[in-house]
Image (cartoon, rainbow, N blue to C red):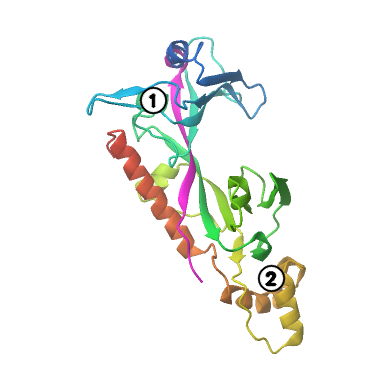
Amino acid sequence: MAFLNFKVDMIRMVTKVTQDNFNTFYMRYVPNNPCIKSYLGYKKQDYHYNLAVDEMSAMAVLDFETGVSRIPNNRFYVGYQHNQETLMEFGGKPYNMVIEFNPNKCDVTCGLLNTILKKFFNDVHIIRVVSADFCCDVPDIPLDNVTIDMGRRRSYCEMRKNGGRGFYIGTRGSNGNVKIYDKAKELGLENKILTRYECHLAFDDLYADMIMGRGFCINDCLPTVYFDSGQMKLIEDVKLRCCVMAVKNGYADIKEFNPRFREKIKPYLEDTAKLIIDNSALKAIRETIITYFFDYCKELNLHY
């Protein structure tokens, strides 16, 4: 049994910004900017102002410390003024502003992303980190060898895209939602087997929980996922052996068995598991978050 390294795949931060400050920013950077797709959201759960930013080689940015020009390669999302907030006629009331970006693919030190973070997310004591997506890649283990013990009732949805397949466990975008899919197909890799595991964790305030040491608990919201290496252990009980083989090969779901028999099956799944999302894996996720935020604060010269 091996535990794989997790990385932060997406971070979602929220802060409060007044209408006046947002309008000043909007009028300076958004109109006629080919890097920004601006649109209004009218659904109850949406933000009113939405900015999808793609800074892919749009312009070079001069690094004043080194004198070297860098090309931003950032793609991120900004939302402002949630539609469930009470609107005021004057511009002094602060509203929620959210930003989402992949810290592994974005450079927080340059481009419009740096401008927004410096202007609106410049104080770690006023920002809230409300959710984060984590992922890890499991090589040489196909989707057919993935077994899920959902533990409690969760929705399940299979998907097919670009010749590959995968599935969602839990409601998409909700706390504990897990997505497992064929990453090799998505990347167009021939003769490769690579399975991607992604999970979405939501928090009241991730920064405060992680950095300020207030604890980290997800209340067992994640399903247990087994990545079977294919090794088979001799089981003398013929009925139990057949049930274990059926679960491993996808002909039966472990939740179909009664609780007593389910407990008999689990040890044989764990014996050949490549990855189990348990306390050790959650510790790795916690350390990933802390490492990211130390780097984030250092890059933006924030003090904590």
Mark 2 or mark 1: name the one nearer the start of the chain.
1
Q: Residue at the location (24% across, 24% down)?
A: 64
| Other residues around mark 2 within 10 Å, as few (<14) / some (14–19) / many (≥20) | many
Query: How many marks are shown on the rendered structure?
Result: 2
Q: What residue type is labelled 2?
A: Lys
Q: Mark 2 points at which residue?
A: 248
Residue 63, disc: none
Q: Give the range drawn in magenta.
A: 1-21
Three-letter code, disc 1: Gly
Q: Which residue is drawn at 39% across and 43% down?
A: 208
Asked which secondary structure carries label 1, the reply is: helix
Using residue 54 as the reference point, say whether residue 268 is left or right of it: right
> Closer to the camera, 169 or 183?
183
Q: Which residue is drawn at 57% across and 54% down?
A: 197
Whether 257 is among the magenta residues is no
Residue drawn 63% across and 49% down? 185
The residue to which callout 1 is attached is 111
